[in-house]
Amino acid sequence: MAFPIAPLYDWVILKPIPENAYSPSGLIYIPDPARKRPRSGVVMARGPGKVSEKTGEHVDMAFKVGDTVHHGPWSGTPIKYEGEDYLMIKEIDVWLLEVEPA
């Protein structure tokens, strides 16, 4: 099913992947205020891309819906849609794209 809202230009809507609530050993619980803001998410929707300022040609995005991406800790704008938390972020703020090993 397609996501019911679509961002424009080079904007992306991510479903944040929450950080684990326990330390790596699993012995210490980390309360919400002490946890870091999620820095990865699944692409739920994306805009068509942007137009190059130099050539005027359309430049498509480097990732597609369903990809897992990583971004800066304070990138984007949190939004709520139908009670769910999402993050609206520009393509340039995406640092890494998870790819399957060859």
Image (cartoon, rainbow, N blue to C red):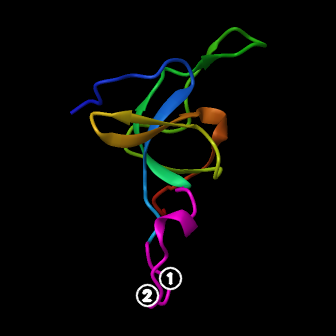
Q: Is residue 61 magenta?
A: no
Rate crowding at label 2 as few (under 14), some (14 to 19) or many (20 or more) other CA atoms within 10 Å. few
Q: Which residues are magenta?
A: 21-38
Residue in the image at 69% along x and 8% along y: 56
What's the residue type where badge 1 is placed? Ser
What residue is shown with label 2?
Answer: 26
Residue in the image at 52% along x and 56% along y: 38
Residue in the image at 56% along x and 55% along y: 39
Residue sitting farthest toward the right: 54
**From the viewer's perspective, is residue 21 above or below residue 2?**
below
**From the viewer's perspective, is residue 20 above or below residue 59?**
below
Numbered tag placed on residue 23 in the rendering: 1
Name the dominant secondary structure of the magenta segment: loop
Horizontally, is 7 left or right of 54 in the view?
A: left
Q: Are marks 1 and 2 in contact (CB under 8 Å)?
A: yes
Q: Secondary structure at mark 1?
A: loop
